[in-house]
Image (cartoon, helix red, strand yellow):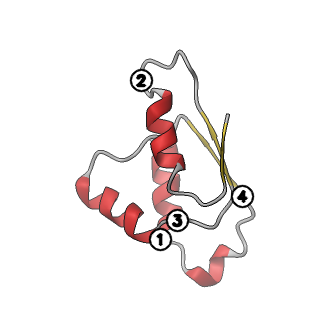
């Protein structure tokens, strides 16, 4: 849940502050299940902040496809 919350925080950061964030690392992140939050993320994307999205192939709670869906909201996303 922390990575999804971080993505939401990045979506709500004022554009003036975006330059102060050099990158973000999101581990086992997933697309929020709440429709309102999903809409907020999609409206604010793509995010210009470089990101590294870490997922586990054997993760039974957050499959890699969920992490990839979140990563697609970022313009410069790397998935590991």
Identify the residue position indicated by label 4 in the image: 23
Identify the residue position indicated by label 1 in the image: 12
Label drawn at residue 61: 2
Q: Which mark's residue is nearer the viewer, 1 or 3? A: 3
Q: Is residue 79 above or below residue 5?
A: above
Q: Earlier in the sequence, mark 2 or mark 1?
A: 1
**Quadrant of image for the N terminus:** top left
Q: Do labels 4 and 2 touch, CB within 8 Å? A: no
Callout 4 crowding tier (Cα within 10 Å): few <14, some 14–19, many ≥20: some
Q: Earlier in the sequence, mark 4 or mark 3?
A: 4
**Could you say where residue 45 lies in the image, as x and y percent from the top left?**
48, 66
Seen at 70% across and 67% down, the residue is 21
Q: Earlier in the sequence, mark 3 or mark 2?
A: 3
Q: Which mark's residue is nearer the viewer, 3 or 2? A: 3
Number of on-image labels: 4
Q: CA distance from mark 1 to mark 3?
A: 12 Å
Label drawn at residue 46: 3
Q: Is residue 67 above or below residue 23?
A: above
Q: Which mark's residue is nearer the viewer, 4 or 3? A: 3
Q: Is residue 56 above or below residue 4?
A: above
Seen at 26% across and 50% down, the residue is 34
Q: Nearer the viewer, residue 58 or 10?
A: 58
């Amino acid at each position: 849940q922390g990575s999804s919350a971080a993505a939401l925080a990045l979506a709500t950061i004022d554009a003036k502050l975006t330059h102060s964030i050099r990158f973000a690392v999101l581990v086992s992140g997933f697309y929020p299940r709440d429709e309102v939050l999903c809409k907020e993320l999609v409206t604010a994307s793509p995010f210009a902040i470089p990101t590294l999205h870490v997922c586990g192939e054997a993760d039974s709670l957050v499959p890699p496809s969920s992490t990839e869906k979140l990563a697609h909201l970022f313009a410069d996303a790397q998935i590991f």
